[in-house]
Image (cartoon, rainbow, N blue to C red):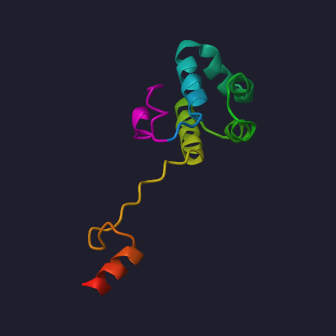
Amino acid sequence: MSASCLCYFGQEPSRTREVKPCRCKPLNQLVARSIIDPGVVQAFNAGRIGDVLSDLDFTADLRGRLAQVRAGTWAEFAVLAYRIVRAEVQMPARIQLPSPVEGLLPKQERASKRHVA
């Protein structure tokens, strides 16, 4: 599992309009650390993943929810953790453009121009 792909959720960071703290950055760090440090997977296997999570910058609520995840393997835990973090992240609102059928003018302006013609 690539540690760098978890944060983007299908969007490039440069295209997001609002700058929000990335809640998935600690998850990326956790997965990357598990690749380098076998102690992360050992802590997971021993049921002490909460100790590792406390070293990272998760919110208290998210840390608690991740610590309660039950998975048979580290890879399964990472996928479930990704889903939990993804559910926490709200995608930026899409721009609401007027319908081409209605035109670009507000309703009041359109109504006044109809009466003039």
- Residue 104 percent across, percent down from the top left: 32, 66
Find residue 70 and report its image quarter: top right
The residue most toward the front is 116
- Please say if 47 is above or below 110: above
Find residue 42 and report its image quarter: top right
- Please say if 48 is above or below 19: above
- Residue 112 percent across, percent down from the top left: 36, 81
- Residue 31 percent across, percent down from the top left: 55, 25
| 50 with respect to 6 (left or right) | right
| 95 with respect to 73 (left or right) | left
- Please say if 65 is above or below 26: below
Label the magenta part by its dominant secondary structure: loop
**Residue sitting at x 43%, y 54%:** 94
Q: Is residue 3 magenta?
A: yes
The residue most toward the left is 117
- Please say if 109 is above or below 64: below
**Residue sitting at x 57%, y 37%:** 20
Q: Is residue 86 magenta?
A: no
Q: From the viewer's side, name the closer residue of 69 and 26.
A: 26
Q: Quadrant of the C terminus?
A: bottom left
Count of all numbered marks drawn on residues in the image: 0
- Residue 46 percent across, percent down from the top left: 71, 25
**Residue sitting at x 66%, y 27%:** 44
Q: Quadrant of the N terminus?
A: top left
* Range of residues picked out in magenta: 1-17
